[in-house]
Image (spheres, rainbow, N blue to C red):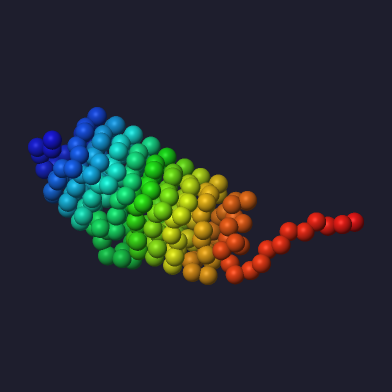
């Protein structure tokens, strides 16, 4: 399928590649349209300034791969362990954002302990996703469904969760500083605390 090791400014349409192994490939400013890479292994690959639109990347393995300036739009990006990719040294200043997701399905994926400052996960479905220990400072998470996702020791300082829903983010074990929420979903923050909430009606 990929007969070269390096591709630049290429557009790939309607590729169907399943359960294949590709090693040491490099993609620069490439676009993937309606491609199916489900259960494919990209080992030590490099994606820079690439875009995936209407693609299926379910259960893709990204061991040792590099992502810089990559955007996924209206795609299935299910069951991926992003922590197995190569992200550089923890705490290193990121001049270019690594990955963004818009209108995607991210269920059952893991971003465990990743540096993802200013990441965009917008209008996505992110059920049972692990964000434990991740740095999501200034992340744009608007409109995303986080049902059963894990937020533990996650940095959400200045993150935007307006219109996000179904999240459970215990304030005691996460960093919430100037984090933006919207009602009524923000009530979940209270329910995660060890307090008793009672409704009452005021009688004149």
For residue 114, what is the image quadrant?
A: bottom left
Side of 81 where 189 appears, left or right: right
Q: Residue at x 14, y 46 (%)?
A: 21
Q: Give the answer, above or below, for where 38 lies relative to 171.
A: above
Q: Residue at x 44, y 67 (%)?
A: 153
Residue 134, percent across and down? 39, 62
Residue 118 visible in image: no
Q: Nearer the viewer, residue 102 or 38?
A: 38
Residue 22, percent across and down? 14, 45
Side of 28 where 126 appears, left or right: right
Residue 43, percent across and down? 17, 51
Q: Nearer the viewer, residue 42 or 120?
A: 42
Q: Residue at x 60, y 70 (%)?
A: 194
Q: Quadrant of the C terminus?
A: bottom right
Q: Quadrant of the N terminus?
A: top left
Side of 109 where 153 appears, left or right: right
């Amino acid at each position: 399928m990929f007969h070269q090791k390096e591709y630049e400014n290429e557009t790939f349409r309607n590729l169907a590649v399943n359960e294949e192994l590709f090693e040491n490939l490099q993609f620069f400013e490439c676009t993937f349209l309606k491609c199916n890479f489900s259960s494919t292994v990209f080992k030590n690959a490099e994606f820079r300034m690439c875009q995936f639109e209407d693609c299926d990347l379910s259960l893709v393995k990204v061991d040792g791969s590099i992502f810089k300036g990559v955007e996924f739009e209206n795609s299935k990006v299910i069951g991926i362990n992003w922590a197995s990719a190569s992200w550089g040294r923890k705490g290193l200043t990121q001049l270019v954002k690594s990955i963004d997701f818009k209108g995607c399905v991210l269920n059952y994926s893991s971003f465990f302990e990743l540096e993802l400052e200013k990441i965009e996960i917008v209008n996505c479905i992110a059920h049972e996703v692990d964000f434990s220990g991740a740095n999501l400072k200034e992340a744009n998470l608007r409109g995303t469904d986080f049902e059963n996702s894990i937020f533990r020791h996650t940095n959400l300082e200045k993150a935007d969760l307006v219109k996000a829903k179904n999240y459970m983010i215990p304030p005691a074990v996460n960093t919430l500083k100037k984090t933006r929420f919207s009602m009524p979903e923000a009530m979940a923050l209270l329910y995660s605390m060890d307090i008793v909430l009672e409704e009452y009606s005021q009688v004149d």
